[in-house]
């Protein structure tokens, strides 16, 4: 593995001092720009930036004393000089891309730092998978810090994962060079109950002097929330309303406001700043989950910043929330997140602070992208065969595997139904009266069948239930091996025969997402690495993902980024109702519940 490291500040200091003093030439000088100072929240016109050894040596009104015969000059021509953008919480796997291709996709959008939690691959491949993600991240020309996953499984006893993570794994990972902290502590009931294993993981993180990520996915801001905050999580991205944001910062946590492909939680929370006047330095912008289509077509952190501004946030405040606030939270304020001496030379040039067109991206002192075109190499790891062979069904599935037997003699039943909520991660616990035909409960109207197919140990097990909200019509099925967080296989459909075809197809290709209608495959996104990611080019994966989205619409689905909704239906730590290999889970009580509520006359 070849890492792309940057010389430490202490080693670079003699040269930085010499350049700033005019005794030595800079490697690069950006001349004549508007300095966006996120420390003082000022716009300072007519400033220059001198760069040496990948770091900023000087920022001031005239860097001519830093220029030598070999110094590269970039004329800013009155453009804004903005710190490279930081994503405070994200999952690379959600982009369907390996770290290298994710970096290639987001660098042209101005993202130069990412704080990533690879808990998706941890559920499939364990600590070895986390190490693969960490190692490829270290190879990239931008800053990708890894948070050691904390919860695999996310809810012990309610799901079965491919591997489990424990305190000993966390302690080992804390010694790796790119580990910045502990990933989101999703098992908030376990923390509230004082679970010894979770407390040991958090203790190992604190002993290493690193940050514990939070995930409190409950609307209850009473005693349970306070108990969770007492456990040690330093941030949280699961807020969905203003009260959530305010509660978190009042308890000393950073409130992370997310805009992903399907999670639109910024607008309802940013009023804590824009209307209530809370200190914005305790708020951070993030994406959490962005698929490849969003990255290629809409952007990454630049999209989030633009959205925050459109929601009424001052542009400089929004930029602080995507730069210095994030760096400070992770203890890296002296290393990145601003344009100031000693910091990594991560700089964006843009002509408009509101629309934020990313015209030039400089990462670690090198021009990394210009006008949307990447100019640096993003090297791949040699992914082992074990990472490419992760879908084990144990047998070929048939339509009968997706049958839901009715109680003896029933003609109608009342059944629990998972209700999808557009643009939000939580679901609704619904009920519906469903007919029985030839002894089987049938989905009708807007209700589809949903199944979770075990894919880690080849048990051949299938859990069946019902879901509402996708709007599918006709005979169809969609299957995905991206099934947060246990990452078995989720199949949603109106036809049991198509559900079987879709599931078997993913076993054949080694994982991904496929959509079938009337016995024919309409779309396929191959994700051969852990059934979660592709090592193909981001543009290729995005094109396939876009074709999948079109096919979903052709089958009647009108939800925004419905694939993301599909992929979270097994996430048993977010209310209200989810599916797992253990059965149907009521996340309000953290119990496996019966699908059939009662037999009707």
Image: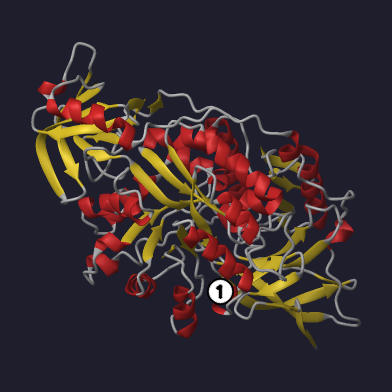
Q: SS class of the residue under badge 1?
A: helix
- Horizontal side, residue 496 vs residue 19: left or right: right
Furthest toward the bottom, the residue is 601
The reply to whether residue 337 is in sight is yes
> Would you identify the image quadrant in which residue 410 lies?
bottom right
> Would you identify the image quadrant in which residue 387 lies?
top right
| Above or below 465: residue 341 | above
Furthest toward the top, the residue is 69
Residue 113 x/y as whole percent: 40, 42
Q: Please state which of residues 354 and 377 is positioned toward the viewer in this rendering.
A: 377
Quarter of the figure with the N terminus: top right
| Above or below 225: residue 290 | above
| Above or below 418: residue 548 | above
| Above or below 546: residue 412 | below
What residue is drawn where x is 70% and y is 38%? 528
Give neighbour class at mark 1: few <14, some 14-19, many 20+ (Cα, 10 Å).
Answer: many
Quarter of the figure with the C terminus: bottom right
The residue that disc 1 covers is 191
Q: Please state which of residues 441 and 390 is positioned toward the viewer in this rendering.
A: 390
- Horizontal side, residue 341 vs residue 225: left or right: left
Residue 561 x/y as whole percent: 53, 52
What residue is drawn where x is 50% and y is 81%? 224
- Horizontal side, residue 499 vs residue 90: left or right: right
Residue 87 x/y as whole percent: 40, 48
Q: Please state which of residues 501 and 225 is positioned toward the viewer in this rendering.
A: 225
The reply to whether residue 76 is in sight is no
Residue 585 x/y as whole percent: 69, 73
Q: Please state which of residues 444 and 174 is positioned toward the viewer in this rendering.
A: 174
> Would you identify the image quadrant in which residue 109 lies?
top left
- Horizontal side, residue 404 vs residue 236: left or right: right
């Amino acid at each position: 593995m070849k890492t792309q490291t940057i010389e430490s500040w202490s080693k670079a200091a003699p040269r930085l001092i010499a350049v700033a003093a005019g005794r030595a030439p800079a490697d690069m000088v950006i001349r004549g720009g508007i300095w966006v100072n996120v420390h003082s929240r000022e716009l300072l016109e007519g400033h220059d930036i001198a760069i040496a050894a990948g770091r900023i040596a000087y920022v001031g009104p005239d860097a001519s004393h830093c220029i030598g015969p070999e110094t590269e000059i970039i004329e800013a021509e009155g453009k804004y000089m903005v710190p490279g953008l930081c994503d405070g919480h994200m999952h690379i796997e959600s982009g369907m891309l390996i770290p290298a291709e994710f970096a290639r996709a987001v660098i042209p959008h101005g993202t130069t730092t990412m704080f990533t939690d690879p808990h998706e691959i941890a559920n499939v491949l364990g600590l070895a998978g986390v190490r693969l993600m960490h190692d490829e991240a270290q190879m990239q020309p931008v800053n990708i810090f890894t948070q050691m996953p904390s919860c695999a499984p996310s809810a012990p006893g309610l799901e079965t994962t491919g591997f489990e993570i424990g305190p000993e794994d966390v302690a080992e990972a804390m010694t790796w060079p790119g580990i910045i902290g502990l990933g989101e502590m999703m098992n908030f009931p376990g923390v509230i109950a004082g679970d010894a294993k979770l407390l040991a993981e958090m203790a190992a993180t604190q002993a290493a002097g690193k940050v514990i990520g939070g995930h409190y996915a409950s609307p209850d801001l009473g005693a349970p929330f306070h108990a969770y905050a007492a456990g040690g999580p330093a941030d949280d991205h699961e807020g969905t309303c203003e009260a959530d944001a305010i509660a978190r910062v009042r308890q000393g946590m950073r409130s992370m406001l997310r805009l992903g492909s399907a999670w639109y939680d910024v607008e309802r929370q940013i009023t804590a700043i824009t209307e209530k006047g809370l200190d914005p330095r305790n708020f951070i912008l993030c994406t959490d989950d962005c698929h490849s289509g969003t990255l290629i077509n809409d952007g990454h952190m630049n999209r989030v910043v633009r959205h925050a501004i459109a929601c009424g946030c001052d542009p400089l405040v929004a930029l602080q929330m995507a730069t210095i606030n994030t760096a400070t939270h992770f203890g890296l304020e002296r290393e990145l997140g601003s344009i100031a001496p000693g910091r990594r030379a991560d700089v964006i040039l843009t002509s408009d602070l509101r629309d934020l067109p990313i015209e030039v991206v400089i990462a670690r002192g090198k021009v990394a992208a210009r006008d949307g075109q990447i100019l640096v190499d993003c090297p791949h790891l040699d992914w082992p065969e074990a990472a490419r062979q992760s879908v084990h069904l144990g047998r070929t599935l048939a339509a009968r595997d997706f049958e839901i037997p009715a109680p003896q003699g029933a003609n109608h039943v009342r059944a629990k139904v998972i209700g999808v909520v557009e643009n939000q991660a939580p679901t609704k616990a619904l009920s519906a009266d469903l007919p029985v035909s030839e002894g089987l409960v049938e989905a009708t109207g807007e209700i589809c069948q949903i199944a979770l197919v075990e894919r880690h140990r080849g048990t051949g097990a299938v859990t069946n239930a019902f879901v509402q909200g996708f709007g599918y019509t006709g005979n169809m099925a969609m299957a995905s091996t991206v099934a947060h967080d246990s990452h078995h296989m989720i199949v949603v459909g109106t036809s049991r025969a198509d559900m079987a075809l879709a599931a078997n197809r993913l076993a054949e290709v080694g994982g991904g997402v496929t959509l079938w209608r009337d016995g024919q495959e309409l779309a396929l996104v191959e994700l051969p690495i852990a059934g979660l990611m592709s090592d193909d080019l981001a543009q290729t994966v995005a094109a396939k993902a876009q074709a999948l989205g079109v096919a979903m619409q052709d089958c009647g689905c009108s939800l925004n980024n419905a694939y993301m909704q599909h992929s979270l239906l097994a996430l048993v730590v977010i209310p209200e109702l989810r599916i797992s290999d253990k059965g149907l889970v009521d996340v309000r009580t953290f119990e496996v519940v019966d699908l059939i509520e009662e037999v009707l006359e």
